[in-house]
Image: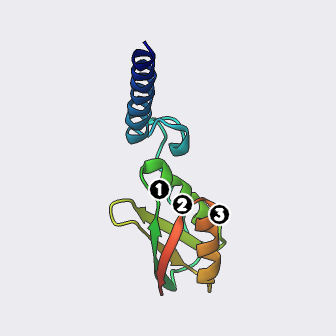
Amino acid sequence: MANAIIIVVLLAIAIFAVRGTMKHMKGESPCCGGGSGDLPPEDKKLENPVIGKMTVHIKGMTCQHCVKRVTEAINKIDGASAKVNLKHGEAIVSYDRKIDSSEVKARIERAGYEVTSVEE
């Protein structure tokens, strides 16, 4: 009898785990913002001509919501505009004034992702 109870409990846990994984992969779990209907991040137009670009390599992005969070974090920096690529795990940051790469890194890390390198 005890074995049957243990099997039922383990089966229930497995079902919830699989359901949670499926939701996560569809972008419906809380860590991914809850909902696949989110619009992509808006492109930020810079006020002045672009004077440079940097490539930021990022670990931890798993879905389009992650892309949106990183894009919005970078776009909050005055003079910076981001194009984030989930497949390559990177952000191309264009800027129209001098910006510090450490500020870009800090914003991304505050959003919950790991910056592995920055190429200026």
Secondary structure beneath dot 2 equals helix
- Please tell me which residue is depicted at 47% across the width and 56% down the height of the picture: 67
**Marks 2,1: beta carbons within 8 A:** yes
Residue at image mark 3: 110
**Which labelled disc corresponds to residue 67?**
1
**Which labelled disc corresponds to residue 29?**
none
Sequence-earlier tag: 3 or 1: 1
Secondary structure beneath dot 1 equals helix
Q: CA distance from mark 2 to mark 3?
A: 10 Å
What is the quadrant of the N terminus in the image?
top left
Q: Is residue 55 in view from this perspective?
A: yes
Judge by depth and name the residue closer to the eye, 62 or 92: 62
**Marks 2,3: beta carbons within 8 A:** no
- Please tell me which residue is depicted at 46% across the width and 35% down the height of the picture: 28
Sequence-earlier tag: 2 or 3: 2
Counting other residues with Cα less than 10 Å from the Cα at mark 3, is it few (<14), some (14-19), or many (20 or more)?
few
Q: Position of residue 23 (x, y in %)?
A: 42, 34
Residue at image mark 2: 70
Type of the residue with mark 1: Val
Query: Looking at the picture, does residue 30 appear above or below residue 79?
Result: above
Judge by depth and name the residue closer to the eye, 18 or 35: 18
Q: Position of residue 84 (x, y in %)?
A: 44, 63
Q: Is residue 6 left or right of residue 77?
A: left
Type of the residue with mark 3: Arg
Counting other residues with Cα less than 10 Å from the Cα at mark 2, is it few (<14), some (14-19), or many (20 or more)?
many
Counting other residues with Cα less than 10 Å from the Cα at mark 1, is it few (<14), some (14-19), or many (20 or more)?
many
Type of the residue with mark 2: Val
Q: Position of residue 116 (x, y in %)?
A: 48, 76
Q: CA distance from mark 3 to mark 1?
A: 14 Å
